[in-house]
Amino acid sequence: MDTNPYRAPTADPFGHSSAVSSGGVTEGVLRQLKGTKGWVKFMAVLCFLAAALMVLLGLLFLGVGIVGGSAAAAAAGDANPLARMGGMLGGVVIGAIYAVLGAIYFYPGIKLWGYAAASEYLLEDRASQTLERALNCQRAFWKFMGVMVIVMISIYILAFVAMLIFGGIMAASGAAAGAGG
């Protein structure tokens, strides 16, 4: 959409830039988005690759856990079905964890790809609605990353507290065994 060449010139009494494209988006904004678009796509592709790798590793652990747990119990001559199930359970749990992590990696990739696509489209149509869509994808990405950081910090704190409690219990049981013997 071309600007009207017959429109009266406008002046900004506050000194803001008047280099505005037809959609209300400045050339500086377009330059900045063009400069980040390639890197954002690169990071989105890395998120997709990480998600696929995590899912594949999850399936691998699942298969190894099921087959390996049964084979290890059979090789040990243990006919107890609970022993076979115990070996399989570890692989299944690890496989499920990796599959969930893969799904978690997929979401930020979608948001980054949406941001890059909207930025690319903004370079063509220069509409402020497209800029809003791009910024909304970026907001959703950073909100997700912030929540994930809070979750990870919480997990680390809980793991640290659990290690302290477990260490205290082990030290107390060791001291009691040493005093009784």
Image (spheres, helix red, strand yellow):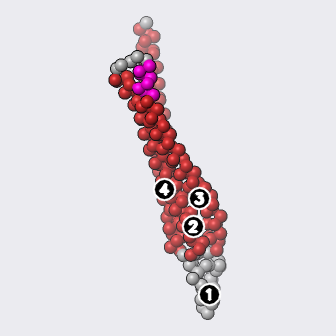
Q: Residues within 10 Å of mark 1 (few under 14, many from 20)?
A: few
Nearest the eye: 75 or 30: 75
User: N-terminal of the two: label 4 or label 2?
Assistant: 2
Identity, as a three-letter code, of the amino acid under mark 4: Lys
Q: Main secondary structure of the magenta part?
A: helix
Q: Which residue is mark 1?
A: 10
Question: For mark 3, what is the residue?
Answer: 41
| Magenta region includes residue 117 | no
| Residue 128 disc label | none
Q: Quadrant of residue 124?
A: bottom right
Q: Secondary structure at mark 2?
A: helix
Which residue is at the front of the view, 158 or 22?
22
Q: Residue at x 41, y 35 (%)?
A: 92
Q: Determine whether the residue tagged by mark 3 lies in a helix, strand or loop.
A: helix
| Whether residue 150 is visible | no
* Closer mark to the observer between disc 2 and disc 1: 2
Amino acid under disc 1: Thr
| Residue in the image at 53% along x and 44% along y | 53
Q: Amino acid at mark 2?
A: Ser
Residue range (magenta) = 68-75
Q: Of the two numbered discs 1 and 4 on the same chain, state the one appearing first in sequence.
A: 1
Of marks 3 and 2, which one's residue comes earlier in the chain?
3
- What's the CA distance linking mark 4 and mark 3? 19 Å
* Image position of 45 (left or right of 140): right
For the residues marked 3 and 2, what is the alpha-carbon distance in whole angstroms? 11 Å
- Work out how far the residue at label 4 is from the one at label 2, CA to CA, in angstroms: 19 Å
